[in-house]
Image: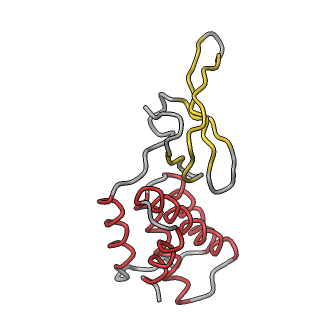
Amino acid sequence: MFSIGEYAVCPGHGVGQIVDIEEREMGAQKKTFYIIKILANGMTVMVPTDSETGIRGLVGEKEVEEVYKLLHDHDVKVDNSTWNRRYREYSAKIKTGSVVEIAEVLRQLFLLKEKKALSFGEKKMLDQCRELLAQEFSLSNKIDKNAINEKINSYFQ
């Protein structure tokens, strides 16, 4: 259970702050919802408090190190399927909210970028993945987001 003021990750949206916990009537029953303000764009999201996949806490140091190891490993096969198939697969991974899945997409896009020009949608997705990771790592480790962006970029220079 989260409290007002805590940060949580909404898969597909990114890090948000819980600004309220409300009870609403849904048909004949009452449900409790977290009201979350997404930091990246100011959007407000309602997530049921009993949802198992709705939100999760910020990652710990162990997961951050796992992501950095994953980003450092460039010995992977780059997906050469059509851009729209890659886009669908990558979108599905991002929507899971898993930092490891997001990091895998980021790594694939950075490595693909070295071989050929990315489509507009892929460039946007690369930026989105970098922003999702940087924002969460920044809040969970209390480090400046720009420093984390620089560290992520350093793995691909």
Which x, y percent locates residue 29? Answer: 59, 12
Viewed as shown, does residue 20 lie left or right of 154?
right
Which x, y percent locates residue 138? Answer: 47, 62
Residue at position x 49%, y 63% in the image = 133
Q: Is 26 above or below relative to 146?
A: above
Q: Residue 21's image quarter?
A: top right
Which x, y percent locates residue 25? Answer: 65, 16
Colouring used for the render = secondary structure
Viewed as shown, does residue 106 lie left or right of 64?
right
Which x, y percent locates residue 108? Answer: 48, 75
Residue at position x 37%, y 82% in the image = 74
Q: How many marks?
A: 0
Residue at position x 57%, y 34% in the image = 47
Between 91 and 40, the one lying in front of the other is 40
Between 80 and 57, the one lying in front of the other is 57
Q: Is 70 above or below relative to 20?
A: below
Q: Is 152 above or below relative to 5?
A: below
